[in-house]
Structures are given as C-alpha cells and as structure tokens.
Amino acid sequence: MNAAEVFAIVPALILAGGAAVATILAIPRRIGPRILAWVGALAAVAVAGSALANGTGGASPSVARDGASVFFVALIGIVTAVSCVLAAADPRRIARSKDEPALALLSACGAVVVVLAVDLVVLFVGLALLTIPLYVLTSRTAPAGDEGAVRHFLLGTTGFAVALYGIALLYAATGETGYLGLGRATHNPLYLAGLGLTLAGLVSHVATAPGHRWSVVTNVAISGALLRLVAVTSTGEVGLDWQVSLASLAAVALALPGIASIAERRVRRIIGYATIAQLGFVAAATASGALPAAAFALAVYAAQALGLFAVIAILPQREPVLDDLAGLARRRPIVVLALGLLAVGLVGVPPTVGFLAKVYVLEAAVRADLLWLVVVAAGATVASAVGYGRLVLACFAAPRLDAIAPARMRVGTAVAVVIAIAVLAAGFVPGPLLDAAQAVHF
Amino acid sequence: MVVGVVLIPLLVAAACALPIGRFARVLAVFSGLLTAVSVAAAVWLGVGGGPVDLYYWAAPLGAQLAVGWDGWSAAMLLLSGVLFAAGAAASGAVARPRAYFALWSLLQMAVAGVFVSRDLLLFFASHEALLVPLALLLWGWGGADRRAVSCRLAVMWLTGSALLFTGILALGVGAHTFSFAALTGYRLAESSQVVLALLFLAAFAMRLPLFPFHAWLARAYIAAPAPMAVVLAGIISKTAVYAIARVCLPLFPRGMADLQPYLLALATVGALYGAILATRQRDTRMVIAYASLAELDLIAVGVFLATPGGLAGALIASVSHGLVVAILVLLATALARRIGSFGFGPGGLGARAPVLMALFVLAIVGLIGVPGTSGAPGQLAILAAAFAVSPGIGLLASLVPIVLAACGAFVLRAVFFGPAATRGHDVGWRERGLIVALVALALVVGVVPRSVSDLADRTAAALTELRR
C-alpha cells in the first residue's frame, strides 16, 4: 500500500474512527443517543472537508483519487452529516437507539469505499460494509413482529449473491479484478453476463432499501459506484449494451413511480417512489454518457430526499398515511411551505434546481439519440406531479379530531427549510453546483 | 428597464414576507401601474427595450438569461401591468392578504418573464413557473369546486408543457443554442418542422385554449374569483397568443405553413362554437367564458394566417380583449352583488342602475367590435386578412361577431330591461372608478388604434420578414 492509497482512503478511515468513538461513547449511561448522533455529524463533516482538501492525482490499482472521488465522497459526507443531525433531532423514541450513529458511520464508511473502488474485490467489500450495518439498524429499530427488516435482509443478501456471481464471471472472462482490465474486455458473452449481474446486484440495493433517511447514503454510494463502473467499461461495442440496459432501467425507474404514487396512500412509499424517479434521471444521464449531468442530478436528488425525510420526521406515526398529514398546514405552516417547495422541485418545475437537473439530464439524452427516453421522462413528470401534489395538498385537509399532534422539532424544521431554500436558490444560481459536477471525471 | 418589469413584482412578493398586512394590496396595485407606466415611457422614448444578454444562467446547459422586448411584448407588458393593477385593486377583502399578494406578484413576475425572455429555456421556465402561483391562487382563494378545477388545470397544462419541453430540448440540442436570436437564423429540416411545431403548439393550444383543448376553461372561469378571472382571461391566455406568434411562427415557418389549414379550421370552428355556446348560457361567468373562447380563437385565426394584417389584427384584438374581458368580469361581479347570484336575475335592473347598464352596454359593444370601440380595429384587420387568404374562413369568422352581438343583446335584455326592479342599487364610486378607468383605456384603443398598431405593424412586419 503506497502513500497515495493511504491518502485516498483517509475519509473512510475517519468514518471508521468515528464509528469506533461512537461505540465507545455509547457505553457510559450519561451520554445519550443525541450526543452520539452529533458526534457522527462531526465525523461526517470532517469527511467532507477531507475529501475537498484531499485533491486529485496519484493513481493506485485499488482506489481512485480523481475528480469523481472528491465529488462523491464530499456528497456522502454532507449527506451523512445531515442524516446524523436528523437522527439527533428525531422525536420518536424508538428511532433513537444508541447504536444508530455508530452503525450509520460504518455504513457511510462502506459508502466511501464503494465510490472509491476501482477494483471489483474492493467494490464488494465496500458493498458489504455499506449494507450490513443497515440491516442491523432496520432490525434494531423495527417493532417486534415486523417482517420488513427480514425482507430487507433477505432481498439485500440476494443482491449480494447476484453481484458476487457477476464479479466472478467478470474475473473468469478477463482474468483481472481491476476496472482497467475490464475496460479492455471485448464482446464476450461471459463478460456481458458478468456486467449484467453486477449491475443487477448493485441496483437491487437501491430498490430494496426501505424509505428511511439512511437510504440516501446508500443510493448516492451505489449510483456513484455504478457511474464509475460504466465510465470505465463502456468502451466499444459494450458501450451500446450499457446504453440500452441503462436507458431501459431509467425508463422503468421514471415511469413506474409516477404511476404507482398516484394511488399510494402511505407517505413513506410516496417519498420512496419520488426518490426512485429521481434516481431514474441519474440512470438516464448515465445511459447518455453525461457524467457531470448524472453527478448534478444525484446531488439534487440527495438534497431533496433529505428534505423530505426531515419533513416526515415530525409525524409521530410509524407508518404515516396521507390522512395523517391533515391539518399540518395550520399547525406547521413553515414545514408545509418547505414540503411544497420540495415537491415543486421533485416535479422539476422552474425555478427550482430540480428543473435544471431535468434539463441537464434530458439535454444529454437528446444528444445521445434517446428521444424516446425524453418523452417517457416528460410524461412521467405529469404523473409524478399528481402523486407529489397529493402529498402537499393532504396537508391542507381538515384534521381528524383524534389526530395525534405532530412533534415539535426545531432542528428538523430548520433542516427542511434550509434544504428547501437551497433547492430554490440553486435554481437561480446553479453555478457552484454545476462547476462541482463539471469537475467529475474518472 | 427590461429587467425591471420582472424585478418589481419580485420585490413586492418579497415585501409580503414582512408584516405589512393589507398594505400588500397597495403595493401590488402600485407594482402593476409602475410596470405599465415604465413600459409606456420606455416605448414612447424608444429606450430600454434592446436585447440584453445578462449572463449564462447555467452555462453547461446553454441556458442564458437573455431578455429584451419587441413591439408585441411591449404591448403585452403594458396590458399585463394594467390588468394586474386592476385585479389587485379589485381584490378588496381577501383572506390571508400577504400570502395572496405574494402569489399574485409571483404570477405577475412569471407573466412578465414569458414576455421578455429571449432564450427558449428561460421562456419555458417562466411559462411553466406561471402555473404554480396560478394553481395555488385558484386552490386557496377560488370558488366552490376550486380544488378539482385547479387540479384539472394543472394536469392539462403540465401535459402540454411536457410536450413543449420535449420539443424545446430536441430543437435546442440540435441547434446547439437556445437563444431566440441565434435560432431565427437556424434553418430546421422541413420534415422535422411539423413535428416540432406540433409539440410546441400542444402547450400553447392548451393554454389559449384552442378549440378541442378548452375543457378547463368554463369551470376555471367559474371557480376563479374576479381578480383571478381578469388575469386568467385577460393576460395569461395572451401568453399563448404571443408564444405562437413569437416562437412558433419564426422558428417553424414551413411547419406552420403546412399545418395552417388544420389550425385555421380548428380556430374558426372554436370561435363559432364558443360564440354559439355563449348564447346558450344562463350564468354571466359562463357567458364571459365562452365569449372569451370565441374571441381568443378568432385572435388565433389572425395569428395562424401569419400575414402582416392578421398578426397586427391579432395584437390589437389581444389588447382589446384583455381590457374588455376585465371590464366584463368586474361588471359581472358588480351585477352578482346586486342580484345575489351570477344568474341573470329577475330583469329590469336598468331603471335602478343606469350607470351599470351604460357600462355594460359599452363593454358588450367593445366585445363585439362596433366601430369606434376597442374591438373594432383588431377584428376588422383579422377578418380582412382572413378574406384575403380564404373567403370561406373569412365568411365563417365574420359570423362570430354577429352571434356574439345576439348573445350580448340577449344578456342586456334579460338583465336590464323589463318591468322595473324593486331592489338593487347603482354602482358606487369605488367600483365605478376602476371600471371607468378601464373603459377609458379601451376607448382610447378604439379611437386611436394607432397607439397599438404602430407597435403591431413593426412586430408583424418583422415576424413575416422572418418567414421568408
């Protein structure tokens, strides 16, 4: 291991150290989950800072140190920090376990490894580190008898197995595990099957992640890893295969959530659909070969998803439905205003940054001759407007008499408002974020 | 100056965040008047309208903050200033005034943005952003079935916008630019012109509304409170007229020429259909809605003809229709206040409310385009242009004012004539001030149509020049 590699994995080391500190601090009785979550946020901020300070350059066979790693590690750091802040502010007692910060930091450490990996074995190790703490987390916070955690675990391990099978096939086809070796491979059935299975294994982790705030880190990491894998391997004839499979994936991810959310009543599900549609834009940009557009859309997705999770954290119900939002406009007008702005951003209505992300991605799709995908995306926008519109409008209904009052959550509200303002402001002044996305290269 | 028309409403909207209470209304009226006066002054002096390329909004996307105005946009900006001021003045005792006027100013800003954009992405952004405050205003302050209406409106318009968006991306990416100035020099392959023109027209036809896309119209006019109806009918429909003339015609000359027969047929049928339906209504708001449909589709005939006469007529008729429909909506509200409903009432109101009757007669005369009123020059120009292109279209289109006249006469007779009413009072000074000011403006347009047509001729000539 040379110095460049050590420098490259400094963010992961910080997160692992943070997890260790959080575990030790959890032993004394006096230190509550709230303080631990703030420790986690501190570590995550340090990660974002170290990623930005780390810079680029210095090739190594297992981890990358380029523009993309700076962008994705910084994004993971920021997302983890915000999620930790939300965890610290979460008013539901069940969601506040003392293990949560340590597990989340371990998972974030896996996320950093995944986006840095330029070797299939490193990718797999990172994937395990990313997801296994989350299985523990879901089962720890789930009430007794909830089968959701088991389902998550089973589906997740299936995804693992598929990804591992794909990696094995890729090794069989090329004799190498490094991404560089993959890029040289030809149109070989074994190789294509390996790529397909790896893609399926990676993507299944996005699809099976339950709708809670830690899923944002997972989705960002998987998307980042996928981008890197595609960027390296989409050469020659394989490029077209990638384009077709990713474009189909994007079309499904764009169209289905919009339609499904029209009839959905569970708030978490609607938000889950919304985030999948956003990731559909990332997939569309990846299919079009526009890496900066994908990075931009991913950052926009992360911001909006975190904002939504901040908003629903004030609902006392474990599985809130639309009716539980009734009366929120009267009780928490500022939260509803933020939710409205986020919904407008999700639909991609100007002048929010969601609009720019949509334009950026779809321009790239037109350039890549994927006009049909643009039509699907534009149609899905209308369907999604109905779905997310219901979310906002439900807040204006008259509350039921037996309704439980929403929690008073200053920090969560502040996070939601700051993100909503950022979504609006970045629509007017997208320059800094665009510059950051432009710097993404592999 | 060009930036000012967008910034003034934005400042008012920002001011509504402060605890200013009902003072917000004064600010909103002021911002509308300021827009109108400053645009008028700038046009008069011939300054401040030039194209301004501010800077790249989002450089990798090719989105530019390019703004500017020509004769047509200047006329529309004037109209928008007047109507937004009138609408704000008419929203007397709204609930939650700060939220209302903040949304109101944002709507004004988006409308102004549509007229000054010189970049397709910026244009689309304004065109789309307009929907949010509009739907929210309808949702929050509308009448009986406001929720269903605002959802239907939003879904229909979003569908149109989605198609427009696809078209804009396909065009802009192909041409490597989104700026109007650069695009007018770009010659698109003839085969793709029709498809792109259809994609663009989908959004504008939905918003105008062109004949088969008017499903939202009548219910929206009924659900909208008077000030909203004023801007919805008066200026938001004109964004579609403007967009067809300013975007579709110069960018897709061949495509629009190929589609012309079908578009003319739709617009003519729509105009007649609207006029005939207007005669069948028993609700003043429905009469106004369908008469508006007739007028707007008649204006669309002028635009689709794409001759200098037709375009100039469309512009003058746009201004006239904006003013007249505002007067009619305000009068209908004043009438409803006396009768207690938007129906025609027991009749005979003329004896008790002569001023109201006089104003009503003036407005209806203006609507059907009796010479000397604002409706005349525009309508005559459109009809003359229609006859020049196709006598059949001209003949059918000239039936529209006749049917509207019959409708207007029927409404006047039902409301004002007959045995003298026992209750009801005439319009007060407060109501009168606003309506008389608008009537005076409409009369100015009617008596001195040159005030608008000068602007119109320049633009129309420029637009037809581009088609060559």
Image (tube, rainbow, N blue to C red):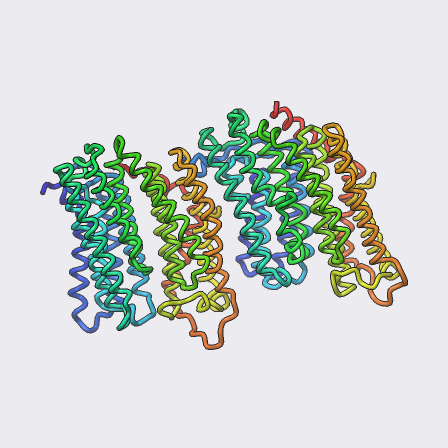
Q: Residue furthest bottom?
A: A402
Does the image show residue B172? yes
Q: Quadrant of residue A133?
A: bottom left
Give coordinates of residue B274: x percent, y percent. Answer: 71, 47
The picture places residue B133, in percent across and down from the top left corner, at 56, 53
Q: What is the residue that sits farthest to the left in this orientation?
A: A1
Q: Quadrant of the N terminus of chain B?
A: top right
Q: Residue at x 38, y 65 (%)?
A: A410
- Name the residue furthest top: B468
Most foreground residue, B450 or B6: B450
Residue drawn at (76%, 39%) of the image: B445
- Direction from residue B363 to residue B261 in the image, left or right: left
Q: Nearer the viewer, residue B265 or B310?
A: B265
Q: Quadrant of residue B421?
A: bottom right
User: Residue at point 43% right, 61% down?
Assistant: A264
Looking at the image, is A370 positioned above or below residue A108?
above
Q: Please, is residue A400 above or below residue B103 in the view?
A: below
User: From the viewer's perspective, is B415 left or right of A349?
Assistant: right
